[in-house]
Image (cartoon, helix red, strand yellow):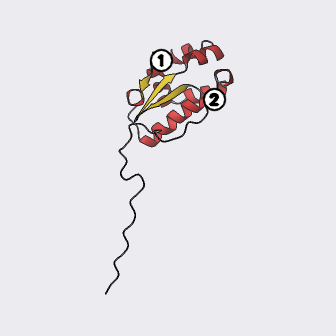
Amino acid sequence: MAATPAAEPPHPDADRPPVDHPDADRPEVDRPEGDRLELVEVLAALGHPVRLEIVRRLASGAEAFCGEVVPDLPRSSVTHHLKTLYESGVITRRPAGRRLYLALRREDLELRFPGLLALVLG
């Protein structure tokens, strides 16, 4: 009699519903406080066309669901760009259920680097 192979256990995430945002389960990384924002890091974050477009879409000042402001890109690219903007201190992230809300840190950026956003956003 031949032995039947053991069934593989299901993947731990197999029964979880998909999430609407790339950072749903990712722990928050400390972002710099307003007085600790570094110009080099902010400029590097704003120096990529995709990230600049995200910031332009957030420029109204209102918090927005990431699906509304992030261009149609692969999930890994979205995660990378949002992480870069967040860790440089350009945006805030607020998870709410399965959604991730983003906001531009306009006041902090303006206090630390007066006029920078006006120059960058045109």
Asked whether the viewer can see residue 113, the reply is no
Q: CA distance from mark 2 to mark 1?
A: 19 Å
Q: Secondary structure at mark 1?
A: loop
Q: Residue at horizontal 68%, vertical 24%?
A: 36
Image quadrant in which the N terminus is located? bottom left
- In the rendered image, residue 67, in percent from the top left (x then y), is placed at 38, 31
Residue that badge 2 annotates: 41
The residue lying at 63 percent from left, 14 percent from top is 111
Q: Amino acid at mark 2?
A: Glu
Measured along the vertical axis of the image, is residue 100 above or below residue 117? below
Mark 2 Cα shell of 10 Å, populated few (<14), some (14-19), many (≥20):
some
User: From the viewer's perspective, is residue 22 above or below residue 16?
Assistant: above
Q: Earlier in the sequence, mark 2 or mark 1?
A: 2
Front residue of 47/1: it is 1
- The residue at the point 40 percent across, 63 percent down is 9
Position of residue 18 measured from the top left corner of the image (x, y, whole percent)? 36, 43
Q: Which residue is mark 1?
A: 59
Asked where in the image residue 60 lies, by quadrant, the reply is top left
